[in-house]
Image: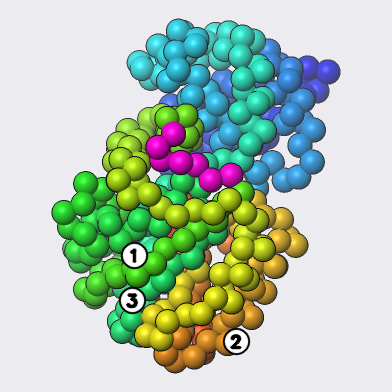
Amino acid sequence: MNMMAQVGTRGELRRQSRIARALGSPFVAAVLEAGDRQLHHAPQTCRLIEGWPDDPSAAALAMRFNAALHALARRGDVPALSALYQRAQGDFDAVLAQTLAAQDGFIVRWMQTPTQTNEVARAAAFAAALIVLRRETGMAAELLEIGSSCGLNLNLARYAYDLGGTPAGDWDSPVRIRPEWRGRAPHIAPVEVVGARGVDLNPLEAGDARARARLIAFVWADQPRRIERLKAALRLARAYPPRVDRADATLWLPERLAEPQAAGVCRVVFHSMVLQYLGAVNRQAVVDAIDSAGARATADRPLARISFEWTPARDEVQLVLTRWPAGERRVLAICHPYGDWIDWRA
């Protein structure tokens, strides 16, 4: 049974290990590879992954597994694991075998809830798209975000950006985002937000220490710049708490889109790496709600959608802007999944 489960789970953990290595995280890749080899020491976790009813890649099971180990390392519950993470080298197989055997219950409980990345670097892509909207409409934006997690990207107007040499946002912000920029830099325009509201089934509070620890655990352990940027965004969110409603996005979004919209303001629905978790029926419900609202949009009350998502083939992440009343859809950029680089096509 253990060997069968190990063979069944090997593909997903090893698939993600290859992705991690390609994205410049050899330590995370090594953890996933050793975890795959030693997974039979954690029978509950093994059964969870082996019996997962849906697509394990879409559910990011390997990232849930990796985050559970990172959380344990930061907590210090397994000293050998904490030491491995601090040194970033050692006997990965021996340490993972010990950890999986001792912490099987913790890992399986962690993996039963969805990922909570709330990657702040993706805000640079949204800021660039908002600059395009500002130049084309001359309007400030009212933001509606689905899958907000802790709502950190609702604060995107409070961050400082260097977009290929183009400064944007609040240049005095402690959160500074400078992705590797490929292509022509966007023209300078304000990132002006007059309102921002989000939704999540299980929103996290920046003021909750356990929530902050969970978000940090989902950042790859060998990417300290991401961790420090996340900490800065969490501090800012404690000073300026984002508004995130606990609700089902398929019910919440039509209600928000039906609310009165001020003239001269562009209403913007945006989302990043969330559609894969919704399922086909709910994904279509979100699209239908936006399209229906788009059909009601006018020149002085326009609607836009900014999507930062994998393509259906999961071969690239596209930043897509759709704007109504025309309904024009454009791929603005191809992006690194965590926002490290932006290949601008606009």
The residue at the far front in this view is 260
* Local crowd size for mark 3, using a 10 Å CA cut-off: few (<14), some (14–19), many (≥20): many
Secondary structure under tag 3 reads strand
- Magenta segment: 202-208
Secondary structure under tag 2 reads helix
On the image, which quarter does residue 238 sit in? top left
Image position, residue 64 (x, y; %): 58, 34
Q: Which residue carries the number 1 mark? A: 127
As drawn, the label of residue 87 is: none
Image position, residue 334 (x, y; %): 44, 63
Q: Which residue carries the number 2 mark? A: 295
The answer to whether residue 305 is seen in the rendering is yes
Q: Specify whether residue 48 is painted magenta.
A: no
Amino acid under label 3? Answer: Ala
Q: Which residue carries the number 3 mark? A: 140
The disc, 3 or 1, on the residue closer to the chain's N-terminal end is 1
On the image, which quarter does residue 265 sit in? bottom left
Measured in 3D between alpha carbons, the distance from the residue under mark 2 to the one under mark 3, in whole angstroms, is 21 Å
- For the residues carrying marks 2 and 1, which lies nearer the camera in this image? 2
- For the residues carrying marks 3 and 1, which lies nearer the camera in this image? 3
Q: Who is closer to the viewer here, 335 or 118? A: 118
